[in-house]
Image (cartoon, rainbow, N blue to C red):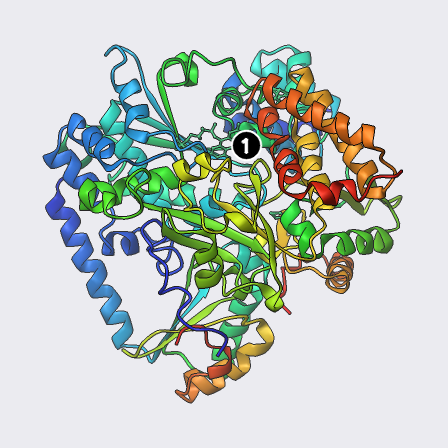
Amino acid sequence: MIRSNVLSRQKRVVLRRAGSIDPYNIEEYIAEDGYFALGQALGEMTPEGVLEAIKDSGLQGRGGAGFPTGLKWSFVAQQSAEKTRYIICNADESEPGTFKDRLIMEGDPHAVLEGMALAGYAVGANEGWIYIRGEYEMSRDILERAVSQAEELNLLGDDMFGSGFSFHIHVHAGAGAYVCGEETALLESLEGKRGVPRIRPPYPTVRGFRGQPTVVNNVETLANVAPIILNGSEWFRAIGTARSPGTKVYSMLGDVNVAGLIEAPMGTTLREIIELHGGGMKGGKAFKAAQTGGASGTIIPAEMLDVPLDFASMRESGAGLGSGALLICDEDTDMVDLAYVLMRFFENESCGKCTPCRVGTAQMLEALDRLRRGTARRADLERLEEIAKYVGVSSFCGLGQAAPVPILTALRYFREEFESRLRH
Amino acid sequence: MKSLEELRRIKERALQRRKLSGKGSRARVVVAMGTCGIAAGARDTMTAILTELEQRDIADVVVTQTGCPGLCEYEPIVQVQIGEQEMVTYGNICADRVAVLVEEHIAGGEPVEKWQLTG
Amino acid sequence: MEEVLAATDRVIDAHKADREALVEILREVNDENGHLTRDDLQRIAERTNLPLSEVYSVASFYSLISLEPLGRHVIRLCQDAPCHVAGGREVREALEHELGIPFGETTLDEQWSLLTTSCIGACAVGPVMMVDNDIFGNLTPEKAREIIARYREADVQDVTPTPQGG
Ligand SMILES: Cc1cc2nc3c(=O)[nH]c(=O)nc-3n(C[C@H](O)[C@H](O)[C@H](O)COP(=O)(O)O)c2cc1C
Ligand code: SF4
Ligand code: FES
């Protein structure tokens, strides 16, 4: 036997049905209480009631920043009545090491659709768009089929559940560009333009898709909505921590025995996740560092293994939860090489709109390459740090602002390793 | 969809159908066919299962697919349920393991312990 | 000319020929023909009522849209950290060796283009590469060479291989 009860240790809310139901068959979703939250909401709750329930639940956005979902919805709900509103599902998932949204879409597509319809009801939107990254062909196919099956049963469409409320969903594929996950770049791309970020404010909640008030939510955020409406916000608050209720889906990779997707209550520590869910370190090697939150996440050392993984606690420790990607590195990991590979990603994906990010990422990559090859001098390292700080504060959007994070955190905890690579 | 009542009826029907499909057949085989699964070879595994069943003239087995359960390390993942017994989950079932799996678990009724994931 | 652009027109016909559909139109024409020619861009510009420069600028922004001809098969090897630490570097070298070209180039016989990609969300079975639209995981240098061999063989018989375990 390979190993036992890996799955039974998890607390599965969002991933409850993924890997057990047939995603191509809407009946299997309904058999497991699918669309009951929507039916209940449309029949028994007011839009304000749904909004209140999400606010009370304390749900925070799972797209990286942890913004309170109820609050975001209320910004859109309070816009003047004659405005058209939109719900957009951000399914551009491109943060290296992150594949939770794909798994949700491929395993339980209707959970996303139901969450979008509930969001639409709460804020008064009748149209939803799923912006899905171009490489996710299978997710797109599954979602498109799910939409048409739901329309056939009139679980989406006009006058759902005889309530008079209508909601239509469109699936839109991207064409390859990480920056399109940033919500304003996403809107540009959805409108058929180059995916270059817009200036904020105005925020999408005020002027979003087609210039109208728009909710942009992550796939995992939306997949939490139906369970909250069905089971109540009390139930949701009882999971996780007071400041970050609910569960989080992590994609754990690297030097652990069992890589893959893990759903655990917010506040679980990294040590618990590695030991309990990851089956410990591969080959019994020692833990050296983890990168939390994907390429734009922080690199943390062993001393931080016991920090609870939730948005607030991580922030207080100078780390980030981000997308939930956890790259686990053992004692053999070359931090300089890792920093180089991470920077290569940003240099590649910088959209070029602003100079600090466009030029800065290229310069940092070059410096890291020299460090990696052992040809860098102390002055190069000092300059690298200087550029990193500058790019972080002066870039236009989150991509450039986050690009230096892995290097700066790696330098904070593993400086000797960088210095040992200098040429004297 | 006109009412919650109608949704309830669909749910009942779906649950009923699930039960019935279990009754008329000897076993249910579920292959995880998410992107990870397919990248690890699940499509070939699926084909091998269908071919193997056909060659052995086993017609009373329902073969379906599901998304990825998140145990990506163990893809391709195949689940086998004999009658009403508990579902058994197998890991790393590439096409070359299918013959043994069908022989021992589906034809013979004995789970193949060494490839089992749950326990 | 008209014949060459028939596929392009078909794609545009399937959409509302407007600005909002531009990225999807570009992508679909690209997938249909392997890349976008100047004539494609011109036709798309005419039918969507956009300046050619604008259509070009949008097309050049996205990595899944190519303005250059690519090989019959396009390999996109993931080069991000999770795949890299799982052994991506060795696979990288094996691919260059096997095809005899560095990354970013197309073989002289126009059969293969060797490109890199950012993470495609299949990291748990990394290292990972896409060949055309299929994703192959758990790569080793041997497995990468095998996959290429299977495509070469399949091309002779005109079938498409699927990812295999093992
Ligand atoms: C460069 C960049 C890339 C991003 N990529 C994604 C993404 O792929 N998916 C996502 O949900 N959010 C992404 N975000 C965050 C979005 O801008 C936005 O905050 C999020 O979709 C809001 O949803 P939430 O409130 O449900 O978390 C990205 C942000 C930046 C700066
Ligand atoms: S920070 Fe980078 S990605 Fe963001 S706008 Fe500037 S160049 Fe583009
Ligand atoms: S890092 Fe290679 S697929 Fe994610």
Which residue does the image show at 50% across and 71% down from the upper left? B91
Residue A130: quadrant of the picture: top left
Instruction: Give the residue number, with chain letter if any, for mark 1.
Output: A174
Say whether residue A267 is left or right of residue A391: left
- Give the percent coordinates (x, y) of residue A1: 48, 79
Q: Secondary structure at mark 1?
A: loop
> Which of the two residues, A257 or C55, is positioned nearer the viewer here?
A257
Which residue does the image show at 52% across and 19% down from the upper left? A188
Q: If the image is split into quadrants, where does the C terminus of chain A sit?
A: top right
Say whether residue A292 is left or right of residue A12: right
- Give the percent coordinates (x, y) of residue A42: 16, 34
The correct choice, above or below, for C78 with respect to B37 in the image is: above
Say whether residue A412 is left or right of residue A163: right
**Residue C39 seen in the current view:** no
| Chain letter of disc 1 in the image | A
Residue A37: quadrant of the picture: top left
Residue A356: quadrant of the picture: top right
Which residue does the image show at 45% across and 66% down from the upper left? B31
Which residue does the image show at 63% across and 16% down from the upper left? C45
- Give the percent coordinates (x, y) of residue A211: 41, 12
Q: What's the amino acid at mark 1? A: Gly
- Give the percent coordinates (x, y) of residue A419: 77, 40
